Image: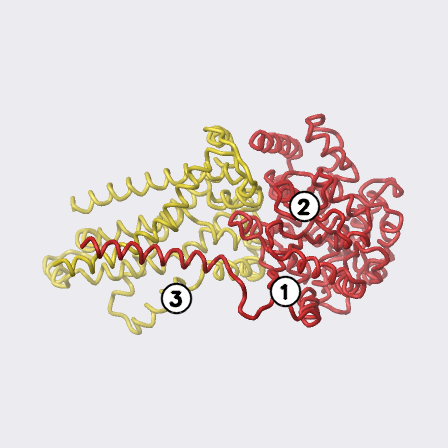
Amino acid sequence: MAKWSRLLGTACLLGVLLMLTACGGGQSADGKVHIEFFQNKPEAKDSFDRLIAKFNEENPDIAVTQTNPPDAETVLMTRVVKEDVPDVIGMGATDTYSVLGQSGIFADLTGEPALDRINPRYVQMLTDLTGSKEITGIPYAANADGIMYNRKIFEQQNLEVPKTWSELMETAQKLKDAGITPFYLTYKDDWTSNLLFNALAPNIAGIDFFLERRDDKVTFEDPVMREVAEKALAVLPFGTNDNFGRTYADGNRAFANGEAAMYIQGSWAIPEIRKANANIDLGFFATPTVDDAEANKLVSGVDTLLAVSESTEHRAESLRFIEFLLQDENIAQYIKEQTAFAAVEGVDQNDPAVAELQPYFESGRLVDFADHYIPAAVQLNSMVQGFLQDGDVDAFLKRLDSEWTKVANRRS
Amino acid sequence: MVKRRAAFYWMTVPALLLFFVFHTFPALQGVFYSFTNWNGFAESYDFVGFKNYYYLFQDDNVGNAYWFTFKFAVVVTIVINVLSLLIAMGLNANIKARNFFRGVYFLPNILSVLIVGYIFNYLFSNVFTVWGQNLGLEALSTNLLGSQGLAWLGVVFVAVWQGIALNTILYLSGLQTIPTQLYEASGLDGANKWQEFWKITFPLIAPFFTINMVLAMKNALMVFDLIVALTNGGPGRATQSISHLIYTGGFEGGEFAYQSANSVIYFIVIAVISIVQIRYLQRRETDM
């Protein structure tokens, strides 16, 4: 009896141990170094697959595989909690990146030769965000948050691209009078409801506002934030009859088929729109947030940065993969397919759709997304979505303050 | 004798061990972390005592999620049980193509919740709205899931559509345990259908009623994947269930310890509800 139970115990323990080690992963049988590349953009999956295939062919000793789950940032967090960090990570420069960086998840890449070719402005953006001198991510591609428009509809209606907020509202009114939907709003997806806020807040209130909020020097019940909230509400009457029932996917399809004249989105959506209608003649302008056209800046953030896991056993191979992605012809192919903007100096975006943005990039009239400076636990997206639906500016601004304070208290 | 007992140990102990390693142990870890300020991935953390619990009771997002979850669970449990009992009685009657109908009604149960959710998400935005416009119904002509006030009804609808399948099968097996002689006898005594149902059918399927109530309630209280597929908690936080809040706050928001405290409280709440439900309904079974 005693013998039996002892045997039983060992057997079970062995079974459990076997299962645990199976999850840990060991040396591969084919003698190659296996690198997992985890990235967050569903739009870019095919582009990266092509680049990875090329890399694997040129480097027979390394096998890179791509992971691209939906809701990737959250999945990445769960992977980090499981202590199963992918070797190379491609993600946006968001609050999540900042928090993970501060927790020492990413390797310090300061002084790596790969950084030499990167536009220092984007590197600065990352260090501003993390508040640390260590560089834990290599900027790869930048995006733009603004307004897309259908050039054909604008021509037919004899409309010019609006340069100021008043012109934008006039343009929308003219389109509405002509029986054309001015904006296709897709506010069922909460992150899209935040895009306009993300363009308005950095221009009207400034990024410094959020840094000052961190130090409790200002509150959201400030006139500048009230202006942001009111302007975010002002576009609703120019949407469809179902602003809160349509999703990002619906919007891409509808705008591609000419169902609306303008579409508040980021440059990342252009490839998706062209998938639905390859012949669409679309343009892209910076959101005219104020009435002084010269003061208006384009909202642009690091769309994809490349980071290496601190715990990877294959740092050298991971960096080789990153250097490969940064080679001129490879990054040129990527930004062409993704209508993104290269962080590598001297690689230009020549797509006619985003030609109007080139002056902003050349003169550096750029400002980062507001929500990169707002703690993720505040859950800004769902708050903006709720606010736009009930339209209560006072309650929204109070709520921003109270949620921020709650999160700050819990973090302290 | 010794040999036979060993066989029983072989049947039970491995499952128990696995359950402990993969279920009980992580749950205990969660309780442990709820007393820290760990964000889920930092190298170090401090003990903060009951601070997380203190903030939990002041957080109106938590209250909001509880209100939605309970409203949702109560409505779903009642509607599912009424409808599935009706369907089960229909499927138990002597109708044509009975097995075909049984198969059809069981179908939703074998589909994954996520797939069902995404399909209905599409139907809500692209099909039901067209119906609503054609019929001239104001309420249906926009996406139900996009309305702060009504989105929860959309989620209830899909949860019921899918949840009915399992409960119908359970009721059906309950109905088949009732001896037909009882109905013959009551027919001779002149009982009508209504009396037949309340005096014979319902009391005799009482154990099935209990298990169906508990299962439907428990599933509704834990609702998560359906929310992700249909509304992702929105608009705003209008359809955010407690599990969804724990997941998004814990991982997206990086407040692992704080949401661990939330799940500890939630575990206690669900345990209490299940115990009360089973106690009460089982006593009812024996009374009848």
Of A32 and B171, which appears nearest the observer?
A: A32
Residue at image mark 1: A64
The reply to whether discs 1 and 2 touch (Cβ–Cβ < 8 Å) is: no
The CA span between labels 1 and 2 is 25 Å
Using the rendered image of the protein, determine whether residue A255 is visible from the camera's viewpoint: yes
Vertical comparison of B59 with B237: above or below:
above
Of B258 and A330, which appears nearest the observer?
A: A330
The red-coloured chain is labelled A
Comparing marks 1 and 2, which lies closer to the viewer?
A: 1
Mark 1 or mark 2: name the one nearer the start of the chain.
1
Horizontal and vertical percent for residue A238? 73, 49
Quarter of the image holding residue B168?
Answer: bottom left
Residue at image mark 3: B107
Pointer 2 indicates a residue of which chain?
A
Vertical comparison of B224 with B180: above or below:
above
- Colour in which chain B is drawn: yellow
Residue at image mark 2: A94
Q: Secondary structure at mark 1?
A: strand
The reply to whether discs 2 and 3 touch (Cβ–Cβ < 8 Å) is: no
